Image: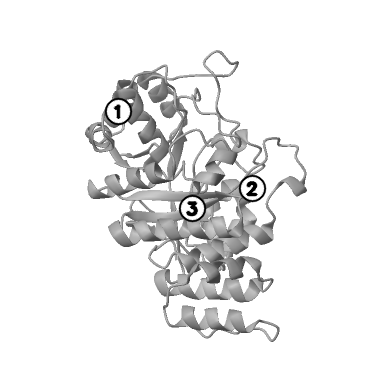
Amino acid sequence: MSIIVTSNSSKRMEEIAEKVRHGERLNLEDGVFLYETDDLLTLGQLANEVNLRKNGKKVYFIENMSLYFTNVCEARCAFCNFRKDLDDEGSYTLNGQEMIEYVEQHIHPGVREFHIVGGHNNHMPFQYYVDSLQALTDRFPEVTLKAYTAAEIEFYTRISGLSTEEVLKELQKAGLKSLTGGGAEILSDQYRKKMKVDKANVEQYLDVHRTAHKLGMKTHTTMLYGSIESHEDRIRHMMQIRELQDETNGFLVFIPLSMQPRNKNAGIMRRNSAYEDLKTIAISRLMLDNFNHIKAYFINIGPQLTQVSLSFGASDVHGTILKERISHAAGALTPEGLTRDELIWLVKGAGRIPVERDTFYNEIKVYE
């Protein structure tokens, strides 16, 4: 596919386009420039070319459920409206049987994955988190457990006294197959201090994923953008993830997460623009040359913009989810989930081929 650089594009954009054409890796300066350019169409076209080269017109989704065993959390991150203290109204901690009852009320045929995250509840022992997975494994052995963030794993090492590897091995015995990508936020210690990211630091986040990869797990990773970070912070974040992927090849997908306001009634000036969201997806596709997939997360950016993002480098639209809570607690205005038919319609409406997948991107069914 040829790249058309519009007449007002700068020489710098032309140089970057040449690097992309020849499969050369983009550097920090390239990434920052792409955030600062107003040439959104050329940026999107470049990202689209890279994605088509990797995935053709296939766009992936999964039948999954989001589960949250507890919202009690010792951390007090500035951007989170999901967490509760133990005695707060609305706080909860479910045991395995209670979660099974919830799942049985809401699950439908075809669900292949439980996406499990929650608070850092230090009122419960590590064994509680192990038993939570074991209960689901015993009752739903056919459903893959993608559970816990790297920050949660680091928390478990502190309450158990075990090493990261020992914690992961115990969870694997209970059925853990993959880690979720959350807890990354922005991989900058300065950012994390200012935003009171009261959990795993940069090195700990990366080390948990490195250790999981060494144990044979494939994992997911994210970037939460749209608060105080600079464009350079975002690019440095991507480069650290890219470096670890060079080392382990253990990441399945990169998920840019658009920051949500803490109030659902917040105006548009308190939210990321569609322009910024599309730029971030496209830049992620160009910077992360060693990732197969970039996910457009409709929970954060909405179904319509997700559809547009499929021409800006995204190759995954996540899944059915069913009752997402964390982004909606923070002010998301999007649906809490979509059906399989809605996801298929969304992808086909963008001129792409929907592919139902499992957690590890094995193809289940192609909807041509």
**Quarter of the rendering occupied by the C terminus:** bottom left
Q: Nearer the viewer, residue 43 or 116?
A: 43
Q: Earlier in the sequence, mark 2 or mark 1?
A: 1
Q: Earlier in the sequence, mark 1 or mark 3?
A: 1
Can residue 47 be seen here? The reply is yes
Q: CA distance from mark 2 to mark 1?
A: 43 Å
Q: Which residue is mark 2?
A: 228
Q: Quadrant of residue 123?
A: top left
Amino acid type at circle 2 is Ile
Q: Which residue is mark 1?
A: 139
Q: Earlier in the sequence, mark 3 or mark 2?
A: 2
Q: Residues within 10 Å of mark 2 (few under 14, many from 20)?
A: few
Residue 295 image position (x, y, % from top left)? 49, 56
Can residue 307 be seen here? The reply is no
Q: Nearer the viewer, residue 113 or 116?
A: 116
Image position of 263 with respect to 344: above or below: above
Residue 108 image position (x, y, % from top left)? 43, 37
Q: Residues within 10 Å of mark 3 (few under 14, many from 20)?
A: many
Q: Quadrant of residue 138?
A: top left
Disc sitting over residue 255 in the figure: 3
Q: Identify the residue at horizontal 35%, vertical 49% (top origin).
A: 219
Q: Identify the residue at horizontal 54%, vertical 70% (top origin).
A: 29
Q: Secondary structure at mark 1?
A: helix
Q: Secondary structure at mark 2?
A: loop
Q: CA distance from mark 3 to mark 2?
A: 19 Å
- Report the mark closest to the observer, 2 or 1: 2
Amino acid type at circle 1 is Arg
- Report the mark closest to the observer, 3 or 2: 2
